[in-house]
Amino acid sequence: MSVLYDVPGPKARRLSLLVSVIGGAVILAGLAAVIMVLAMPRTNAGGVETPGMLDPSRWDLVLDRAYWRAILRGLTATLQMAAVAAVLAIAIGILLSILRTSNVKLVRVPAIIIIELFRGMPVLLLMLFTLLVFSTGAYWAGVIGLAIYNGAVIGEALRSGIASLPRGQKESGLALGLTPLQTRFTIEFPQAFRQMLPIIVAQLVVLLKDTSLAYIIGYQELLNIGLRQVPTTFGSKYLFTTFFIVLFVYLVVNLLLSTVARIISKRTASGRVGGLKARRTAAVIAQLGGAGVAGASVQPGDSSGEAQ
């Protein structure tokens, strides 16, 4: 018996079944309507009738190797930009989180201003600013814009992870004679990073999708090649086809990244990739630090090393 809600009776179960059936029917009807609309022939501005979006003549493009080479070239450019921007974003996020949590006001306040400024600034505006002011070229303008924006978001996420840790973690490190910076890097930061890993990876998925904004500044990424160059080269009748394929490629890449993120999160949480060792180290440090704070001593003749 559930303690959160009453067990539904016969009438409630019938009502739930009825709502589920009706909801499923509405969804199926919507899908059928979309398919019918896509399959209907089109009439262009000149009055010429063209085949529907699902007509086989619009999909013979998928058998053309030149088309897939173009899509692969765009995907490679997208992944190159996303990979470099992700590394820089994580580095910027780590730096900003350290500055944001500093005890020195002259360091902490500028870090807060920087984080809030770049978190509130559109990514495309950062790309355009970098391109127009520094003349870096489309690739580096996109990389720098993505790295700065996502670095600010990741930095705030890491700061939240550090703030959520028990106060005893920091006190234990200080009691062992570590400096505040050493305590931050060896005790607090590894735990905060592992705790915020799902959020960080989710932000990296957003970063990957935001590479499509580089389309505006002329970078030859997947969206640019798929929706601008391919229809120009192979014909505008393939616009919907390549739109669907580009969408599918983005979904596959993002789902793979999300799957990898879940695997990493589970492995680190279960300790199979160093997570358990890190937690045990932190626990020992906390125990020893707590013993030092409490004034406990270890007897010289006690070989087990337990506090008396």
Image: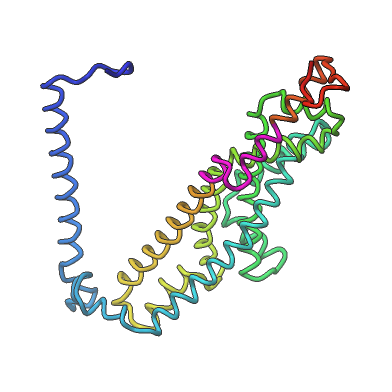
Give whichever of 179, 53 is nearer the camera.
Answer: 179
The number of discs equals 0
**Colour style of the rendered protein structure:** rainbow
Residue 37 falls in which quadrant of the image? bottom left
Q: Quadrant of residue 84?
A: bottom right
Q: Residue 219, located in which quarter of the rendered image?
A: bottom right
Residue closer to the observer: 149 or 266: 266
Q: Name the one closer to the observer, 40 or 188.
A: 188
Identified at 53% across, 61% down, the residue is 211
Looking at the image, which residue is at 64% across and 55% down? 147
Q: What segment carries the magenta color?
A: 265-282
User: Residue 108 in the image: x percent, y percent?
Assistant: 77, 35
Residue 82, percent from left and from top: 57, 62
Residue 120 as seen in the image, left or right of residue 3: right
- In this picture, residue 184 sits left or right of residue 207: right
Q: Is residue 292 on the magenta stretch?
A: no
Q: Is residue 13 left or right of residue 270?
A: left
Front-lying residue, 131 or 115: 115
Is residue 267 on the magenta stretch?
yes
